[in-house]
Amino acid sequence: MPLSATFQRLAALVVALLLVGTAAAASPQSGSSSSTTPAEIGADCSIASSAMRSVSKIRGLAQRREVPCRVRNREEVESYLRATIERRVSAKSMAHEERAYKLLGLIPADFAYLEGLVALYTAQIGGYYDPEQRYYAMAAWLPQALQLPIAIHELTHALQDQHYHLAELMDEDRSDTDTLLARLALAEGDATAVMIDYSRQLRGQTALAKEKSVSGLVMQNVTGAMLTSSMTKAPSTLQALVVFPYLSGLNFVHQLLRHGGYRAVDRAFKRPPISTEEILHPQQYLRARNSYRKLDPLPLQTQDQARLGEAVLTDTLGEFFISTLLSSLIPTNQAAQAAAGWAGDRLALYLPADRPLGVLTWALVWDSAADAQEFYLSMAKFYEKRLEMAPEVIDSRMLWRNSPVGNVVLSLAGTEASLTIGFP
């Protein structure tokens, strides 16, 4: 089970209202007041059929079966999200995931992970498509101006599912966090592009594929997302992970559109991206030049292996995750630069009886020694700020002794770097 199985499961189900700016622009009723309450309007499932016809025409994919539309209130949505987590992610896996995130420093030690995720997604949700029951759920509180564009987005997922089997594409039992996040970005980028193309058709504008860049759309929605109160209550790292599939995914899909329209997007579903490196650098995907290497967890001495036992969790986190982690404590542009040049990583979590907080190891490999050193120095700044203490420096090794999470050791050797947390 990948590290972020819970997060990925929620993200794959819902369309977040961080798309509200784009969605409102896509609505033929966008000039109407957005202050009207859902009770005065009423969620209208009758729009689903016409929305699906529009999706099918824009995407060039035939509808193979009907997709029922169901209206869901907040209580029903929250219950659905919790039930999905309970069914797909065991309580033990959830605890391991939360522990690993806290050891790394991705989320604060006092953050209630499950409750925080459910609250974040319930507040942001605009609708969802259930790939198991194959229906579209419309949020009962969705303003009328957003109902049609959000339906366009979610029914694009339904069409993706009919042709490319979303449950198989994003099977968390067979993929790691980095690969799942990349594939989620493909699916969400495609659905967002279709929603935008729907808007452009209504306004008599040219297709998105004709635009040289979508950076203006991306920045507009990033800014809007970060200003919403529900987003600001969550750690900045989780905010970034929520935003990534939609906005970086849109940029990735836009590059595909420019190189072959929606047929190029279809080809991507048949040869899906395997890492967020490809999403962040679409040219690498287009040139089939992904340098990602599969790694084993950091090797341990025999006596250490006996003491630590078997890893309870292993995963590959990838370039975007690394950038997100670093950017919580160092400048965003520096974090992104430090994560670039990633060529593979493997994280492992152990729960020995004598280490109540757990022990985490992380092996990473980089395209060049310079890339590895840049990561090493940026990670050193991150942990110096996080632990509020200077490290002991021994050659290409930094040690923070007796920190709140135990000993932290950061090492560098050529194109490889490693991190251990809580190791005796």
Image: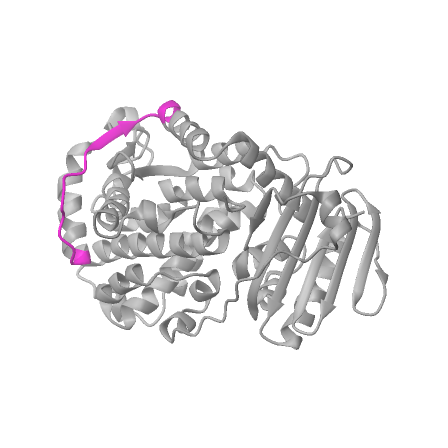
**Magenta stretch contains residue 59:** yes
Asked if 139 appears above or below 215 in the picture, the reply is above
Residue located at (63% from left, 73% from top): 371
**Magenta stretch contains residue 365:** no
* Position of residue 151 measured from the top left corner of the image (x, y, whole percent): 24, 42
Residue located at (60% from left, 42% from top): 312
Asked if 286 appears above or below 391 in the picture, the reply is below
Could you say which is closer to the camera, residue 25 or residue 330? Answer: 330
* Position of residue 98 measured from the top left corner of the image (x, y, whole percent): 60, 38
In this rendering, would 240 be left or right of 20? right
In this rendering, would 214 be left or right of 47? right
Can residue 180 be seen from the camera position used here?
yes
Asked if 277 appears above or below 61 in the picture, the reply is below
Can residue 113 be seen from the camera position used here?
no
* Position of residue 345 measured from the top left corner of the image (x, y, whole percent): 58, 60
Give the image quarter of residue 351.
Answer: top right
How does the figure colour the protein chain or chains?
Answer: one colour
Could you say which is closer to the camera, residue 184 or residue 194? Answer: 184
Give the image quarter of residue 418.
Answer: bottom right
In this rendering, would 186 be left or right of 343? left
* Position of residue 165 measured from the top left corner of the image (x, y, whole percent): 27, 48
In this rendering, would 22 be left or right of 391? left
Q: Identify the magenta region.
A: 58-76
Give the image quarter of residue 107.
Answer: top right
Could you say which is closer to the camera, residue 309 or residue 210? Answer: 309
Total numbered circles: 0
Residue located at (65% from left, 56% from top): 362
